[in-house]
Image (cartoon, rainbow, N blue to C red):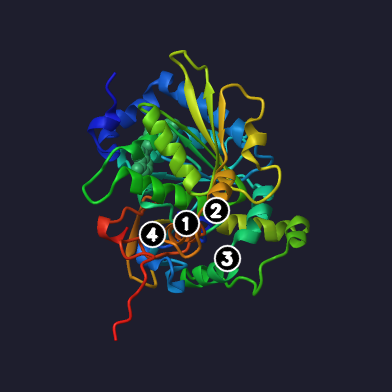
Amino acid sequence: MKILSLNFLTCAVKACKTSPNSYPLHPKDAELVQDELGLKPEMIISVLPRIDWEALKSTCSELGFPALPEAAPTKEELENDEKILKDLHHLLLETSISEGKLVCGNCGHEYAIKEGIANFLLPGHLV
Amino acid sequence: MSRPEDDLAADIHYDDVEARKYTTSSRIQNIQASMTHRALELLDLSHPSFILDIGCGSGLSGEILSSEEGGSHVWVGMDVSPSMLDIALQRDVEGDLMLADIGQGVPFRAGTFDAAISISAIQWLCSAVDSESSPAGRLTRFFNGLYASLKRGGRAVCQFYPKNDQQKKMITEAAVKAGFGAGLLEDDPDTKNHKLYLVLTVGGTQGSDITNVVDGMDGVDVMDARKKIKAENGTVKKGSKAWIVKKKEQMERKGKVVKSTSKYTGRKRKHLF
Ligand SMILES: C[S@@+](CC[C@H](N)C(=O)[O-])C[C@H]1O[C@@H](n2cnc3c(N)ncnc32)[C@H](O)[C@@H]1O
């Protein structure tokens, strides 16, 4: 589960949809892996406005990463500063959770991650 | 010809033996690849995008999405079969994989994806999986979730194998009800290789209109959700049960949670004292 995807995932439990505590999901006992992937500047620039920066900051601190800047970089900064672009690429696309859990801050449901695959299957009564 | 959808749940049909075919059979690979290319053509993306692959299976479609000729996209795949996902792991695909049942919804924030693609999967939603849920309910949850997870102006293309006209109608109507502009495109009709694509657009910006996407293509049926809603609005009385149900559907489409409709919905409340 890439950090990028985690920034967009919500708890799937129906009763959690209205609760602000159900986002972002919190990594627990996470093991991380890094893959080298080709840089796709246009993709990152176009997805940046959709990133929830506050959630990304809290994910990074929960995973013990160095703190992110207070505010998200602007489009101009990304276009002109290759280092910022590469750092974001590395964090969002090259860093994944390979084992562990994602926990909902509202209902406490734990989504297991195995071999990088998060299990979002729910028992019928939670759908 | 018998259809696996009639007899088994998808996660049971797509076991290790079935999943293995998706890496060993070049015939299957070629067919899935050509449909993926067709779907990408219909999505008409101008730059590397963030894409949801619905029923991604062993990642045959996803590998094309990641590739340079496919547009170097970044994708997340949802699939209900552990065996299929296992093959995807073995193929070392670039996309992110999730074990999830699309009939339970699409658990992403509103406006997450630029586009979505689905190859040979959504007809599975027409089959019952348990006694707790109905195909109609699962289709609604899927299309409402998909609609909310796409950004405004986004598109989805779903190639699927309906069993008959009734399933085709059931799927298309569920998409339109969720708010999509929808068109059906049939390639090679009346041959044994005919393929059906449901092309969906999320309104918002000009130029994303479904009629522009499929304009001039042969064998296209366009169903416009907005026109239908307008026509109905004229006849629904404000405050009536039908009006409340319609409002609820609109709220649900926006990703809001609404009380389920019951026999009490829209009833006048009597004063107790
Ligand atoms: C014919 S395979 C196609 C796989 C892949 N899209 C490809 O083109 O190779 C259909 C896939 O849909 C998946 N599927 C069926 N029902 C599903 C559901 N309710 N949720 C998620 N995936 C589902 C199956 O597990 C299977 O992997």
What whole-number distance in Å separates the C-alpha atoms at marks 4 and 3? 18 Å
Between disc 1 and disc 3, the foreground one is 1
Circles 1 and 3 on the same subunit? no
Please state the horizontal and vertical placement of residue A10, each as a whole percent of the image: 44, 62
Task: Give the class, few, some or many, for how many residues have Cα within 10 Å of label 3's Cα (few <14, many ≥20).
Answer: few
- Looking at the rendered structure, the secondary structure element under dot 4 is loop
* Subunit that carries the residue with mark 3: A
SS of the residue under disc 2:
helix
Q: Are marks 4 and 1 in contact (CB under 8 Å)?
A: no
Disc number lying in front (4 or 1): 1
In three-dimensional space, the C-alpha distance between marks 4 and 1, rounded to whole angstroms, equals: 24 Å
Quadrant of the rendering where the C terminus of chain B is positioned: bottom left
Left or right? Give the position of B129 relative to B73.
Answer: left
Q: Amino acid at mark 2?
A: Asn
User: Does the CB distance between marks 1 and 2 fall below 8 Å?
Assistant: yes
Which of the 4 image quadrants contains residue B3?
Answer: top left
Mark 2 lies on residue = B233
Mark 1: amino acid: Lys
Label 4 crowd (10 A; few <14 / some 14-19 / many >=20)? many
Q: Would you name the residue on which mark 1 appears?
A: B246
Residue B128 in the figure: left or right of residue B217: left
Instruction: Between residue B54 and residue B248, name the one nearer to us.
Output: B248
Q: Is residue B54 visible?
A: yes
Query: Which label sits on residue A52?
Result: 3
CB-based contact (under 8 Å), mark 1 and mark 3: no
Spatial separation of the CA atoms under disc 1 and disc 2: 9 Å
Work out how far the residue at label 1 is from the one at label 3, CA to CA, in angstroms.
31 Å
- Return the residue at label 4: A12
